[in-house]
Image: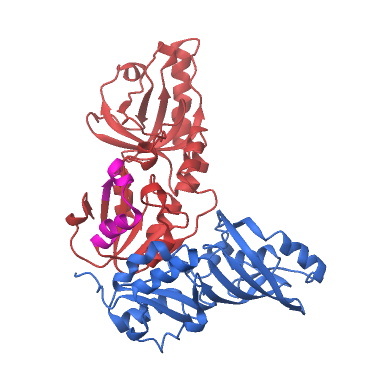
Chain colours: A red, B blue
Amino acid sequence: MNVAREPAELAPARRAAAIGTFDGVHLGHRRVVEAAQAAGLRTTVVTFDPHPRAVLGGRVELLATLERRLELLEAAGVDDVLVLRFDEHLAALEAEEFAERMLRGIGADVIAVGETFRFGRGREGNLALLEALGFDVRRVPLLANVSSSRIRELVHAGEMERAAALLGRPPEVEGIVVHGDGRGRALGFPTANLDVPAGLLVPPDGVYAGWTNGRRAAVSVGTNPQFDGVERRVEAHLLDFDDDLYDQRLVVEVWSRLRGQMRFDSVDDLVTAIGDDVSHTREAARPV
Amino acid sequence: MPPRGLEPAGVALVDKPSGPSSFAVVAQIRRMTGARTGHAGTLDPFATGLLLLLSGRATKLASCLVGLDKRYSTEIDLSARTSTGDPEGEVVARQEPPAAGELESRLATLRGEIDLPIPAASAVKIGGERAYKLARRGVEVEMPMRRSTVRTLDVISYSEGRVVLELDVSSGTYIRAIADALGGHCVTLRRTWVGPFSVEDAVSPEAFSPARLLPEREVLARVEAARA
C-alpha cells in the first residue's frame, strides 16, 4: 500500500476513492472501503489528519493513531492512501475545488462515501454535487449505531465487548514501551509501561484482560493508587513472557474489563488481586 | 491518464426509462461523447423522467443545478409498505388502504417543511450487496433524517388503494420516504420538472446526440430567470 501526502505523489491511475476520516476503521468505514473495492478500480482511501473536528475546535479522542489507521486500511486491502493534512487551508477550500484537486486530481472516477458525507468550505459539498461533477458516487447507508463517537462512548464506559462489536475487533491502546518504576517486577509481575500518544483514547482506570505481542496480557490503566501515584499510566503484564520490550511500539487489544483500580489493605492483598487478574486474563475470551 | 474531455460542453435533458440506474444513463451518454459527464439529481432505477446531464465543461454548473426544485408524479400503493418505499424492496407490512378522508389528513401532515428519514437505498450496492438485503440479514440500517420542503402535494386520483400524486418538492426530497410516511410504497415515479426544465423537452438516451446539448449560457439564463 502506498501512502501519499499530496495528490501529485500518487501514480496516474483510474481510481475508486473512499473518502472519510475513518478513525478506528470500524465496520461502517469498512463498508465504505468495500463499496470502493467493488468498483474494480485501484482502491484509494482519501483521509484526513489531524481529525477535522479537532481542527475545527472540537475535542476528539482518537480510537487509533494515524499509523494504526494506515495498518488497518492496508489489512482491508486498500491499494493507496492519500493523507490530506487538515488545516485551515483545506477547511477553506471550496467544495468544487476540493473535488477537482483531491479527487479528479488523483484520477478518481468512482467515489464511495457515507450517506451523510459533507466536504469543502462550510461543509457545502455533498453527494449530489459529486454526481453533478461527473463522479460515479456509491452512497453507503449508515449502519445503525456504528459511529466513531458511539464507540468512544462505549470505551469510556468500559464496555469493551460492545465497542468491539461495532469496531469489528477489540478496542486497542498503543504506545512505545518506556522504563517504569520497576514496581511490577518487584511484585513478581513485570509490566511494559506504555507511553501513549497524546490525544489517543484510553479506557477508564481499571484492570483489563487483553492481548499484545502475541501473548495474553493483564492491562492496568490508572495512577497506581497503592503507591500514591499521580500520573495516569497504561501498563501491560504479558503472560508467560519475560523479555525486554523497551522502545518497541506495542498495540494492546483490550478485551474486557476485570475490575476497577483500588487501594488494598496491604501489598500482599494487591499481589493476590493481581494473581486473580492474571488467571481471569488467562480465561478471557477475545470479543468478536 | 489524461482527464476526460471538456468537450462537447452543455446540458442534456434526458428522459430516463425504468430499469437502468442514473449512472448507467450517464455512462451511456459518456460513451457517445467521450466527455466527462455528471448528472444533477439521481433517479432510482425503477423511476423514469427527467435527468439533467452535465457534459464536459458544463459540469462546472454543478453547484447551481444540484439544488433545483423538482416536480414528480407518482402512483402509491397504500396497501403495503416495503423496505425501500419502492417496488424493489420486500413487503414489510400490509394493511387496508385508508378511506379518502383519512388519506387527506395524512397528506396534510406532509405539506410544508417536514423531516423524513432517508429511505434504505434500493439502488445502492455495498460490497456487491444491495443495501436493503443487508437490512434483511439483520445488519440494521439506520437512516438519518432529512429536512424537505413539500410545496404542493395534490391528489390526481384515488381508487382501489392506489393514489396518484403530483408533488413540487425541494431538492433532496425522497418521494419514497413520502410514500412510506403515507403507509404505502411507490409503484411508479416520474420526474416531470427540474427547476425550469421540463421532461417534455427531453429525449430518450438512445435519441440523444451532442447537438441536443443546451449551451451553458442558455442554461444559466433559464435558471436565473426562474429564480427571479
Above or below, comparing residue A158 to residue A44 in the picture:
above
| Magenta extent | A83-106
> Principal SS element in the magenta part?
helix
- Find residue A159 and report its horizontal and vertical position in percent: 52, 37
- Viewer-closest of B216 and A66: B216
Name the residue at 22% across, 69% down: B3
- Residue B105 rendering spot, x and y as whole percentages: 77, 62
Magenta stretch encompasses residue A104: yes
In screen coordinates, is B225 left or right of A75? right
Residue B79 falls within the magenta-colored stretch:
no
Picture quarter with the N terminus of chain A: bottom left
Residue A219 visible, this orientation:
yes
Estimate the x, y position of residue A270 in percent, counting from the top left: 46, 16
Tell me the residue at 55%/57% (across/down): B141
Towards the viewer: A274 or A26: A26
Above or below, comparing residue A228 to residue B73 in the picture? above
Q: Residue at x 23, y 28 (%)?
A: A246
| Residue reaching furthest to the bottom | B207
Question: Residue B149 appears in which quarter of the rendering?
Answer: bottom right
A11 relative to A158 in the view: left or right: left
The residue nearer to you, when weighing B22 against A270, is B22
Q: Quadrant of residue B159?
A: bottom right
Q: Nearer the viewer, residue A109 or B108?
A: B108
